[in-house]
Image (cartoon, rainbow, N blue to C red):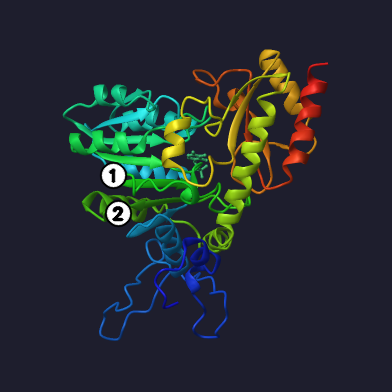
Amino acid sequence: MTKTNWTKRTLAAQAMGKIDAGTMGIVPPIHVTTTFIRDDDNQYRTGNIYGRPDNATIREAESIIAMLESAPEALVFGSGMASAVACFLALAPGDHVIAPNVMYWALRNWLMTEGRHWGLSIDFVDMSDAKAVQAAVTAKTKLIWAETPANPLWSITDIAAVAAIARKAGARLAVDSTCATPILSQPLALGADIVMHAATKYLNGHSDVLAGALACRTPDAYWERIRMVRKNVGAILGPFEAFLLIRGMRTLDLRVRAASANAMQLAEAFARHPQVTEVLYPGLPDSPGHAVAARQMNGGFGGMLSIRVQGGEAGAIRTAKEVQLWKRATSLGGVESLIEHRASIEGAGSPCPPDLLRLSAGIESAEDLFDDLDQALKRAHN
Ligand SMILES: *Cc1c(COP(=O)(O)O)cnc(C)c1O
C-alpha cells in the first residue's frame, strides 16, 4: 500500500494490506515460533530473539491498533487487565494515582488490593468533575486513570480537561477507551498519554478472544517500562489469538457503527417504556455527560447502555430471566447482545444500583432486540 492517506476503515479492512510474501496469500500466516536462529557470527539481525517479547503476528495486530489510534506504537497483552495493570506496575512504589470511583470493577478491585500492596497511593474521585480531579492532585501524582464512557453508569470524562490537569501536574493521563473504541473516540488526539483497550471487547468483537492493548502518544521512558513489564511478566498475547484479533479488527468500523446505532435506538425506545425508570446512555440529550460526549465522540455514543427497572433488584433479575434473544452474560462488545444484572457480579461495595441491567447492544436487528426485552420487562412485571 503506497498511498498514505487511506482512511482507517480501509486500512483496517485490509489489515494494513499485509500479504504473505512467500506465497502471495492475501492473509498472512500465523507466526507460532517461540525462538529464532542466530546468525553464524552470533548476531540477531532481524531483531527477533525469543517469543516472549518477539512475535510477527503480534506486531501485525499492534500496527493496526497504532494506526487506529494514530499512535506511534501499540502493545498487545494477554488480556485487558494485563494491559491496564502494566500501566500501574510501570510506576514506582510511593507514586500517587488518581482513578475514577465509577470504573471497570475488576481493575478498581486490583487497585484497592494489589495496587496498594505494590505501594501506590490511590485516590478515587468523580472523574466527570474536573474540579474534583484537580483537588486530588498532589506533588507525587504520576498517573491519572480515566474510563469514558465508564462502566456501568456510562459517565463521561472530559479527556481534554483532565489531560490539561495531568500535564500541569507533571503526571500522565491514561484512558480506558474500551467502550468508546478507536472508531468513536481518539483520546491521544485529545491529550491523553496512553489509551487502553480491553481488546476482548469491541476490537475483537466476537466473544472468542481475551486480549488487551495499549497505545502511546510518545514512546518515552514510561512506555519503555511498560514494554519491560510485558516482557518480564510474560503478559504477551498468543499468536493464534493475535490472528483472531486481526481478523476481528477488519470489521471493527462496521460493527461499532451498527452496535452504536442499535444502542441509540434502544435508549430512545426504553426511555419511554413503562417498566423502565431510567436509561443511562450518553447519547440521550438529557444525560449528564451528553455535551462532553458529543464534543469528544464522533459518529455515535457507543454500544453500551444501562436501564434501571421497576421492582428493584428482583425486578431486574426477573427481567434478565425472561429474555430469549439477549444473552444473559457478563462482558460486552461482541456481535451478539448481552444483558447483565451488574450488581450481582460486582458484589459488596459496588456503586452499581441493584435495579440496573447493563446492556451490550450487538449488531442484530434493533427491532428484534427491543421486542425481546420489551416482552421480558412485561412478563417480569406481571
Ligand atoms: C473487560 C474490560 C476490561 C478488562 O479486560 P479483560 O480482557 O477482561 O481483562 C477493562 N476495562 C473495561 C472497560 C472492560 O470492559
Q: Position of residue 107 (x, y in %)?
A: 44, 34
- Residue furthest to the left in view is 139
Q: Which residue is mark 2?
A: 228
Question: Can residue 360 be seen from the camera position used here?
Answer: no
Q: On the picture, is 118 further left or further right than 29?
A: left
Compared to residue 6, the image places residue 101 above or below, namely: above
The residue under label 2 is which amino acid type?
Met
Q: Residue at x 29, y 31 (%)?
A: 97
Compared to residue 54, the image places residue 129 above or below, namely: above
Separation of residues labelled 1 and 2 (CA atoms): 8 Å
Number of residues whose C-alpha sits closer than 10 Å to that of mark 1, classed few (under 14), some (14–19) or many (20 or more) = some
Q: Secondary structure at mark 1?
A: loop
Q: Which residue is mark 1?
A: 90
The answer to whether the residues at label 1 and label 2 have Cβ atoms under 8 Å apart is yes
The residue under label 1 is which amino acid type?
Ala
Compared to residue 175, the image places residue 138 above or below, namely: above
Q: Position of residue 236 (x, y in %)?
A: 43, 56
